[in-house]
Image (cartoon, rainbow, N blue to C red):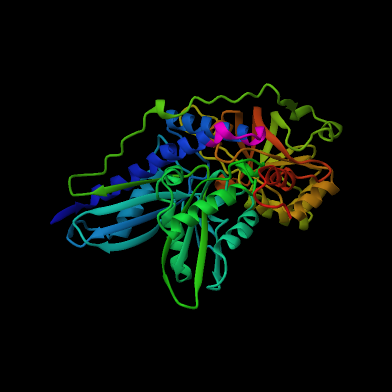
């Protein structure tokens, strides 16, 4: 009979969360590098280069891969012969591990969890509680998988109760384009089939913890219907031409994972959960011998990738005219220098409320750019912690009001904009620029100064003033309302030629 100590669980969970904050799974890095080498669209290739460079920097510097350090999800399988040397419940042990991990002084992780989600939405300040799934299994060990899921990918999850005669492939191919690029492709799609509605979602989530092995499956061939489905969907989802960051290209997914479960005769539940380019998870076992030992990967296993910014247009944001902005073309790479302001959902909601009341905003945004980001707190000599963009569509409903009231020139965020935002951008001859999701540490290195200038009570959602130097972005929506996320995937879907463009 195995005795599992309380402190070993706490320490293992804490160590695991620190580990996955700065180490990608190597199988994923190898898959991204293979996609990078094959990519024909230069914009998508550049995005993957930034992801790979960022990953190596994070592994070297032990800083978060993404500013969104996630909601903690834990899968625990407890052997029936296990005994506990503990005064805390298993749930409390895991949450204490989360608390220690997120408050670690050498690598403070961003607190993103809000209690009272339908009410006050108050930050718990230590990222607790985790979402925990338990199984009681045979054996004398405790098996734990720890993942940190960012909102950008989680929020794009989809679920449907299909009819038994419906095509799963057709539904997936119809659904994936509606997910946009806010889940930060290239990544993986986890698909759960069967059971009940909640079981299908759980299967999808669990599948994402499996290794990236689609190339091995292609080499040996499928041996059952699930494997056949994985291969078919891998080919067809990539044939949609969505590409890295939604910029169009050959690779949208590096793997398709599927788990299934028996279901009711009248039912066919199907769920999709994406894993983004900042995928983070690790698996370990506790056997009573102490805390888990997590072996760091070798830095030489990361590919030596460089990104050539020599063809990018350099822009001085402190001395920019509207006429210059009108010359920017969708898909063009810019290197931004000068002053920008940050602002996410909560800051936008407060600004819009102030505008409605006729109150003066605490920051003059006329002729300025606002960056949709909630940065990680700095450590040691950092100006700011990892500061990659958040999903821009969440700000769509605020866009027209802010542009109209402030004279803002443009916005910087992640992935596409929706129709109402694009129309507002066109009406006000503003622009929307896109930074690479999954390259947060790399982006932060372009920030030379950072200070909170408004709404300090909102924590990471406060308005910061950043001074940046050569911050890389792409023009996603120009002053005419042309969107690269609308045009590029269709171009590449046609070039790939496996799925007709409708």
Closer to the camera in the image, 34 or 467: 34
62 drawn magenta: no
Residue 270 or residue 288, whichever sits in front:
270
Q: Is residue 411 left or right of residue 321?
A: left
Q: Quadrant of the N terminus?
A: bottom left
Total numbered labels placed on residues in the image: 0
Magenta highlight range: 35-44
Q: Which residue occupies 76% across, 54% down?
A: 419
* Front residue (pair 47, 431): 47
Q: Main secondary structure of the magenta part?
A: helix
Q: Residue at x 33, y 62 (%)?
A: 134
Q: Position of residue 445 (x, y in %)?
A: 56, 28
Q: Position of residue 347 (x, y in %)?
A: 65, 50
Q: Quadrant of residue 329?
A: top right
Residue 64 in view = no
* Front position in the image: 300 or 86: 300
* Residue name at image x 33 percent, y 54 percent: 94
Could you say where residue 87 lies in the image, as x and y percent from the top left? 22, 58
């Amino acid at each position: 009979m195995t005795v599992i100590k309380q402190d070993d669980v706490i320490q293992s969970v804490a160590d695991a969360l620190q580990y996955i904050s700065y180490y990608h799974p190597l199988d994923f890095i190898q898959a991204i590098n293979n996609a990078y080498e094959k990519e024909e669209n230069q914009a998508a290739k550049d995005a993957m280069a930034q992801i790979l460079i960022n990953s190596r920097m994070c592994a070297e510097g032990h800083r978060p891969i993404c500013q969104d350090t996630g909601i903690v999800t834990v899968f625990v399988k407890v052997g029936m012969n296990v005994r506990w040397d503990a005064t805390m419940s298993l749930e409390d042990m895991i949450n204490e591990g989360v608390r220690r991990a997120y408050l670690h002084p050498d690598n403070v992780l961003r607190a993103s969890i809000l209690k009272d989600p339908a009410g006050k939405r108050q930050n718990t300040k230590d990222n607790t509680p985790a979402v925990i799934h338990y199984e009681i299994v045979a054996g004398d060990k405790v098996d734990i998988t720890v993942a940190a899921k960012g909102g950008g990918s989680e929020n794009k999850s989809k679920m449907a109760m299909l009819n038994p005669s419906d095509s799963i492939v057709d539904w997936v191919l119809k659904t994936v384009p509606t997910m946009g690029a806010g889940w930060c492709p290239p990544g993986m799609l986890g698909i759960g089939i069967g059971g009940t509605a909640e079981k299908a979602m759980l299967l999808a989530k669990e599948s994402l913890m499996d290794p990236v092995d689609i190339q091995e499956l292609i080499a040996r061939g499928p041996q059952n219907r699930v494997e056949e489905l994985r291969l078919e969907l891998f080919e067809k989802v990539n044939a949609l031409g969505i590409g890295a960051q939604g910029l169009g290209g050959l690779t949208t997914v590096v793997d398709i994972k599927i788990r299934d479960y028996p279901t009711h005769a009248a039912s066919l539940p199907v769920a999709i959960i994406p894993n983004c380019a900042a995928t983070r998870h690790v698996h370990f076992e506790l056997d009573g011998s102490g805390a888990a030992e997590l072996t760091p990967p070798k830095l030489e296993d990361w590919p030596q990738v460089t990104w050539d910014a020599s063809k990018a247009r350099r822009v001085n944001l402190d001395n920019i005219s509207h006429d210059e902005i009108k010359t920017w073309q969708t898909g063009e790479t810019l290197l931004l220098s000068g002053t920008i302001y940050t602002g996410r959902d909560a800051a936008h909601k407060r600004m819009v409320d102030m505008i409605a009341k006729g109150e003066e905003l605490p920051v003059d945004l006329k002729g300025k750019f606002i960056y949709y980001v909630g940065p990680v707190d700095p450590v040691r000599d950092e100006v700011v912690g990892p500061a990659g963009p958040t999903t821009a569509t969440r700000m769509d409903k605020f866009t027209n009001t802010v542009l109209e009231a402030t004279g803002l020139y443009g916005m910087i965020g992640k992935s596409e904009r929706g129709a109402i935002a694009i129309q507002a951008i066109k009406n006000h001859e503003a622009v929307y620029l896109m930074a690479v999701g999954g390259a947060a540490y790399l982006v932060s290195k372009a920030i030379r100064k950072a200070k909170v200038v408004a709404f300090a009570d909102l924590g990471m959602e406060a308005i910061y003033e950043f001074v940046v130097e050569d911050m890389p972005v792409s023009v996603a929506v120009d002053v005419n309302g042309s969107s690269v996320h609308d045009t590029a995937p269709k171009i590449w879907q046609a070039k790939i030629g496996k799925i007709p463009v409708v």
